Image (spheres, rainbow, N blue to C red):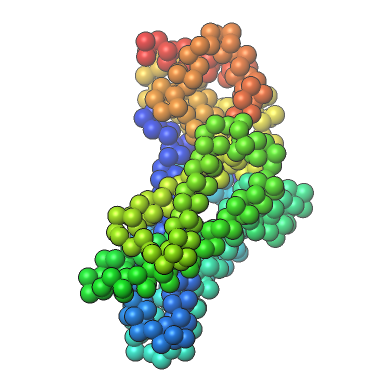
Amino acid sequence: MDLPHFPVFASDAFLPGLLIAAVAITHVFLAQFAVGGGILVTFFEWRAEKKGHTLLRDFLHRFFTTLVLVSFVLGAVTGVGIWLVTALVSPRPLLLLVREFHWIWGAEWCFFCLEVACGYAYYVHGRTLGFQKRFWLAAGYSFSAWMSLFWVNGILSFQLTPGGWLETGSVWAGFFNPSFWPTLFGRTFASMALAAIGATMVAQLIRSYDESDTREIVRNAATLLLPLALMPVAAVWFLAVVPEESRRYVTGANVPMTMFFALAALFSVLIAGTAIFTLLKRRPLFHLPGTVLLAALAFCATGATEFVREGIRKPYVVHGVLYSNGIAVEEVRRLRRRGIDSLDPWPLRDPEKYPTRTVRNGRRVYRELCSSCHTPAKMNGLVHLTAAWDRQMLESNIKKLHLLKTFMPPFAGDDEDLEDIVAYLIWLRKGTE
């Protein structure tokens, strides 16, 4: 693979991947709210015109103000943040995605610009336009926001199921990969649910609305929660098309993956149950604390879903192509012959800290192969994970780590690198005793 190598960002205090996770989960939550918000606005415009409902029309301007502030400001900032953090922490996978899908990224950005243009036009002129123009502005915003999701979803799902791209190199085979459609439907359903919860919260915060006004808005918004009932179909479809190893992680082979998958399902069921109760019993949960709880559940469901989506790719970051430490599958054999020096020529920041050449090189091996998922002795620390291994076990287990733990990439170093990483771990142990 002709991808250049970059200096590795490593931290002894925290996992660099957590930076990506924190920014990405927040952005996904806000971006899906923006997509669902467009659907809700278009639905409310149609409903208001059909029923002659002045309340819904008055609410739309207030809701769209919130949508602009949240999605256009915070969503845009966190979106840029993902690019910056990913370029710092995981540059090789990002470069692969940009190189293979640059025209698709370009299409996504064009739709994002159209989304912003329609959104601001609706926000500024919506109250002065007639229904037809106002509706088409809302529909334009909704369509372009959903198309932005469409393009990004294909690239993200490619990382887990590259599909025919592995054999043909076809961009479209990689984009319309096996998990494309189930994840697209799942994200669309989640977006609509987030918009419904957001609209409910905004309605409760408008002091000029009495209880009957709030009840009416909540009942209309709850309609967008109903597609969550189809989420189990999307989840089963998704599990049917992912690699066998990934499916095993979710169904019991990996406890954290199984737990987070179950939590995402539970939170979705609770939110969908609230919608059914609201619509069938005509007694909406319109008290603010209840809505805040629903929003918290939705955020937790988003976080759990993203955690599972990222976690079940292991040991890869692009399945079958790049391991989670950025080493290409085809590079492992070469590195086992030539060593880490051929990959990581950059000196240590503080070489005087390490007593011997062996320990210094062991630190460089750790930096290149391990630092993306582990710290030396803190979060997910190597010292704690290998505490029960003596020198002989360290050598044997690290050499065959991908067989011992299938979610770990293979050790991509020569015999000298193996001895050096063992020496580094033993030196670390002495410093933490």
Judge whether 158 appears above or below 384 on screen: below
Position of residue 116 in the picture relative to residue 340 (left or right): left
Percent x, y of residue 118 = 44, 78
Q: At 54% from the left edge and 42% from the top edge, which residue is drawn?
A: 261
Q: Most extreme residue toward the right, as rendered?
A: 167
In the rendered picture of this protein, how many numbered marks are placed on residues? 0
Q: Assign the C terminus to one quadrant of the image.
A: top left
Q: At 70% from the left edge and 39% from the top edge, which residue is drawn?
A: 244
Name the foreground residue: 94 vs 278.
Answer: 278
Position of residue 351 in the picture relative to residue 392 (left or right): left
Judge whether 234 appears above or below 198 on screen: above
Residue 319 shows in this picture: yes
Q: Most extreme residue toward the left, as rendered?
A: 207
Which quarter of the figure has residue 203?
A: bottom left
Judge whether 417 appears above or below 162 on screen: above
Percent x, y of residue 219 = 41, 69
